[in-house]
Image: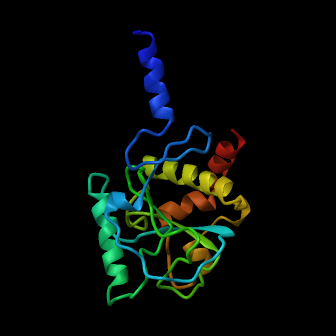
Amino acid sequence: MKKLVPVVCLLLILSGCCPGKKISTSATAVVIVPRSGWNAAEPKPYKSHLPVQITIHHEGTKLEITDDAARKIKNIQIWGMGKDRNWVDIPYHFLIAPDGTIYEGRNVFTVGETATEYDPTGHLLITCLGNLEQQEVPPAQLAALTRLIAYCCKKYNLPLETLASHRDHSAQTTCPGKNLYHYLQNGYIKAEVKKSLAL
């Protein structure tokens, strides 16, 4: 009977017995904290789209690895849906904390929103929390970003060649910050995503 215990435990893990989280065993697997994990409010109705490319952002305000990322995300939604922006929801489809935790944002098939002039229709928006113009990108956050990009490329059939950043689509911003943009410029992110997709 004792021999069966490790087997049962393994089956429970693989079957997704982890409250509030999605688990996969594929090479491009990611664990995504659902909207309930940051106490999201219900979104307002908004236009739909089909994502055709991935665009990387940073949130733009400092966040340390020890800070409460879920609370930060909730506050972003409150601000975005308030009188300052009057958006329908949090603007991004996925958000990544400095410790590498990935959070679900707005529905992937709902157009994102931005404070700059580019039209995000067709863009799947991923943001890294923090001000990456001033802060270095934590290794865990960077690793989670490459895994999430690979996951989205595979799940939503998005060509890696379309990967770009907010500043590549807008002349009004330095987003996603020089310290993250560096990894897009030197090809590191694409190379790591290709490794994941090849597994």
Q: Nearer the viewer, residue 8 or 159?
A: 8
Q: In this view, does 162 lie to the left or right of 142?
A: right
Q: How many marks?
A: 0
Residue shown at 56%/44% (left/top)? 29
Query: Which residue reaches farthest front?
Result: 1
Q: Where's residue 65, x and y in %?
A: 32, 53
Q: Where's residue 97, x and y in %?
A: 39, 56
Q: Which of 174 and 116 is in front in this view?
A: 116
- The quadrant in which the C terminus is found is top right
Q: In this view, does 191 lie to the left or right of 66?
A: right
Q: Where's residue 133, x and y in %?
A: 43, 68
Quadrant of the rendered image containing residue 129: bottom left
Q: Is residue 25 above or below residue 158?
A: above
Q: Is residue 124 above or below residue 7?
A: below
Q: Is residue 153 above or below residue 10?
A: below
Residue shown at 42%/64% (left/top)? 132
- The quadrant in which the N terminus is found is top left
Colour pattern: rainbow
